[in-house]
Image (spheres, coloured by chain):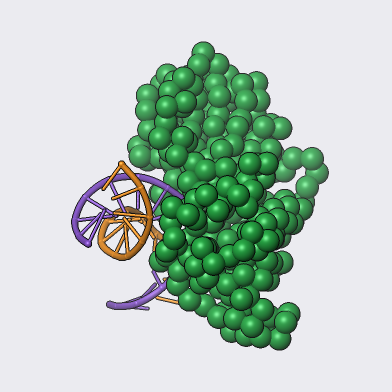
Chain colours: A green, B purple, C orange
Amino acid sequence: MPELPEVEIIRKGLASQIIGKEIAGIDVNLKKSLQGPSESLIGRKIISIDRRAKMLIFNLSDGISLLVHLKLTGQLVFDKKAGDKDGRVAGGHPSADWVGDLPSKFTHVVFNFSDGSVLYFNDLRQFGYIKIYQTEELKSLKVLNDLGYEPFDKEATPEYLMKIISRRPKAKIKQLILDQSVLAGVGNIYADEGLFCAGISPLRTAKELSRTELEQLISCIRKVMDKSFEFGGSSENTFVNAFGEKGEMQNHFNIYRKAGKICPCGGKVKRTVVGGRGTYYCPSCQK
DNA sequence: GTACTTGTTGAACG
DNA sequence: TCGTTCAACAAGTA
């Protein structure tokens, strides 16, 4: 499930390949996966790719933008040549090809570029989407405007969090950092890993945290995300980069999905539920 | 066969 | 109006 680091990895990978390419044709196999007048995209070029939280924004020529959310199982995979997955490997990377032949039965949208290359949108659980907008419309789009600062923004400070906490005195710290209007781009994995790194229990009421603890937490979320960039993202579920390759971060989790395992501190990792989400923590070193 | 998982939205509630 | 809780979405995995 792509969170901020994974989406950023996809953004970089795609940007290195498809900037300047012209859309020659589009196959829409599942209507809800591509919302809007798809025929209006024909002939447009990809100008740039931005990321906001866990969303990607493709800016096309003539003031059109695509807003892409991969949700739980969405994938964007680029092939240099349609029907030839050897063309998927860029820069000599060995193919950890886990996606297999494309299109597959989970390929819902296919962008065919004028040079014969292809971009596949695959989504096993069909929660993800690509929406077509006028670039201008994005400024007033609720899903974008409601987002809080990202963990790497300089505005993401303990004071920023304290201000939010004062409005939400009952919220548990994990619920707050998972809330996209608080820290945009943080998902379940990096919330748990960040809290573990900071030695803070996900069950703590946010209001009880000191300024120092909040500072530690922010720096820890950055640290685990940085680590994920290094390892090419987490592929615990269905994440692959733009070339269909898995990341390695899941082999370096300290706490996520480790219920019953022994924590480096010697304690036993527990699973519980916070805000309706599976939550992993070590009661002996997270206070 | 059944429970569970996951991010986000939207509805219902106080 | 605001915060909080919870169902809904899909489909594979345990």
- Please give left or right for residue B6 compared with residue A280 in the image: left
Asked if residue A4 is positioned above or below residue A19 in the image, the reply reads below
Q: Report the residue at 71% width, 86% height from top.
A: A266
Where residue A258 sits: x, y (%)?
A: 60, 76
Q: Is residue A163 visible?
A: yes
Quadrant placement of the N terminus of chain A: bottom right
Where residue C10 sits: x, y (%)?
A: 35, 54
Residue that sits furthest to the right in the current view: A92
Q: Report the residue at 64% width, 59% height from top.
A: A211
- Nearest the camera: C2 or C14? C2
Where residue B11 sits: x, y (%)?
A: 21, 50
Q: Is residue A41 visible?
A: no
- Nearest the camera: A234 or A227? A227
Asked if residue A83 is positioned above or below residue A104 in the image, the reply reads above
Q: Report the residue at 46% width, 35% height from top.
A: A145
Where residue A200 sits: x, y (%)?
A: 62, 70
Quadrant placement of the C terminus of chain A: bottom right
Q: Report the residue at 43% width, 56% height from top.
A: A168
Residue that sits furthest to the top in the current view: A62
- Count the numbered circles shown: 0
Asked if residue A133 is positioned above or below residue A43 in the image, the reply reads below
- Please give left or right for residue A90 compared with residue A123 in the image: right
